[in-house]
Every structure is written in structure tokens, then in C-alpha cells.
Amino acid sequence: MGQPEQHAEGAGPFTTRLTWQRAEGETVVWESRLARRRGVLSVRGPGDAAGRPSTAGPRALRRLRRLNAIASGAFVTGGALFAAGAAISQFGSGDPLLSASVYFAGGLFFNTGGYVSLLQVLNAPRHAPGGGALVTAGWRWWGYEPMRLDWLSTFVLFVGTLVFGVNLLDSFLQGLSVQQVNRLVWTPDMIGCVLFLVSGHLAFAEICHRSLPCLRSRSLGWWVVAVNQLGSLLFMVSALAAFTRPSTGSLLNTGIANWGTLTGAVCFSVGGVLQLFERP
């Protein structure tokens, strides 16, 4: 017996939703984010008005819950620490070293959240093309799957957290010239913000099954991505305002830089809380 005919949807070369029929007449729908976050397929029998969920095995669901809880907690904590660092800088309740230390601690949690998000993709249940059931493979700490949109989105996010780490480490350096500050601190900050925005755009494409963003107000996953993307945008505003003027040695706008970081960090904490509920 040949493979069932599949209808694929997605953005560009990426497939984010597959629909096919089993031999017994059931229609099966696989969606990338729902399968990897909740471990479910939608199965609709002949004549049924709505599909019913078909879940992965208990071992896979436990794995998904555990990874989701770790990633969620890391983003909530990292966002809270970034917000605290921005508040310290804005309201003058600590010296620059204290603020940099709080930021660095928050960056470590963002690193953790980014990497665990990648692990969620690598170790999520995959659909078996022949029968449509979700199958869970052995544990992997790393994998290279650039033709999967979910992998690409989380990989770009993880790289962004690492680039932010360079920015945060360099912020401890003393006696830098204005040119060195812009090259060693500001430039990695900008690159990290761009990578966060690219990751968010790819995440939207995974949910919307197209290249352009969409509105899915009834989807918890959409809200997670939307809130995080707002946080990334606010981080970008903050980074632009943090450029040091070569003529004066001062930031373009210290207040915008601090408030952009604070509000963006709050968005990531809120996104982490929402993510906690996007589980099996």
C-alpha cells in the first residue's frame, strides 16, 4: 500500500501543517507547534463535525511538560532580572556594577531558556508519515535541522541569547573609549535584538502557516509569540537609544534605553508565564 496523499501548508520551503487521510477514511491534521508543545494530532472521522485529539505516549508527554516548565521558568526569571537591572539603572538605586551583575544573571537564564526551547524541538514527538501516529525518538542534546521552521526559530533565539551574553560580559569592562563601547557593548546588543526579532517572525510563520503574521487571538501559542515579539521590539528600541554619541560620550537617550529594557523584559516574563500553560 502506498503512502497517503498529503496536503502541505507552510511558509516558503517550510512545512508547518500537514493534512492526510488514513485508509479507514479518517482525516489527520498535524500542526508543528501543537505537536511539539502539546503532543497532539487532530483526527476527524467520516461525518464528524470536529476533530478529536490523538496524543503521544505518556513518556513523550512527561518529557514535553518537563522541558516546557524549565523553559518557562527560565524566561520568567530572566525577564524579571532584566527588569530589575533596568530599574536599578533608571532609578539610581545601585552602582553600574550592580546593574551589570543583575543583567548578567538574567542573561544566564535567557541562555537556559533559549537552549531548552531548542531541546523542545529536538525531542518533541514526530508524526509517522505512513500511519500518522506521533512517535517519540531517543533523547538528543543537539541536532541540525535547518529545514524545520521550529528548529530554525529556536536556534536563532538561542544564538541571540548567546550574543546578548557577549554584550553583557563586555559591559563589565572598564576604561573603554566611546568607539570601544559601541563596538563591544552596543553592537552585540543590536545583533541580539535583530536575532530575537527574526526568531519571533519565524515563530509567527510557524503558527500562521504563511510568511506574513496573522491574528490568532484564540490560540495560546499565538499570544506567547506575540508578547515575546513585543518584548523583542522594545529591546530593539532600548538598544537604539543606548548608542553612545562619539561627540559627547553620552547615550542617545538613557531613559528610553532603561524603560525599553524594563518593559521588554516584563513582556518576556509574561510570555514565560503564558508558556507554562502551553503544555500537554
Image: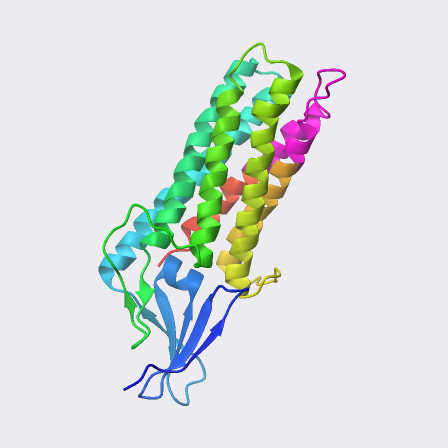
The range drawn in magenta is: 237-265
Q: Position of residue 202 (x, y in %)?
A: 53, 54
Q: Residue at x 48, y 45 (%)?
A: 156
Q: Nearer the viewer, residue 108 or 75?
A: 108
Q: Is 261 a magenta residue?
A: yes
Q: Residue furthest top?
A: 175
| Among the 4 quarters of the image, the one containing residue 43 | bottom left
Q: Residue at x 58, y 46 (%)?
A: 197
Q: Position of residue 258 (x, y in %)?
A: 63, 27
Q: Say whether residue 68 is visible.
A: no
Q: Position of residue 76 (x, y in %)?
A: 45, 39
Q: Position of residue 38 (x, y in %)?
A: 37, 60
Q: Is 202 a magenta residue?
A: no
Q: Nearer the viewer, residue 99 or 182?
A: 182
Above/below status of 232 relative to 149: above
Q: Residue at x 33, y 81 (%)?
A: 3
| Among the 4 quarters of the image, the one containing residue 236 | top right
Horizontal side of residue 11 vs 145, given as left or right:
right
Above/below status of 162 relative to 91: below
Horizontal side of residue 190 vs 248, given as left or right:
left
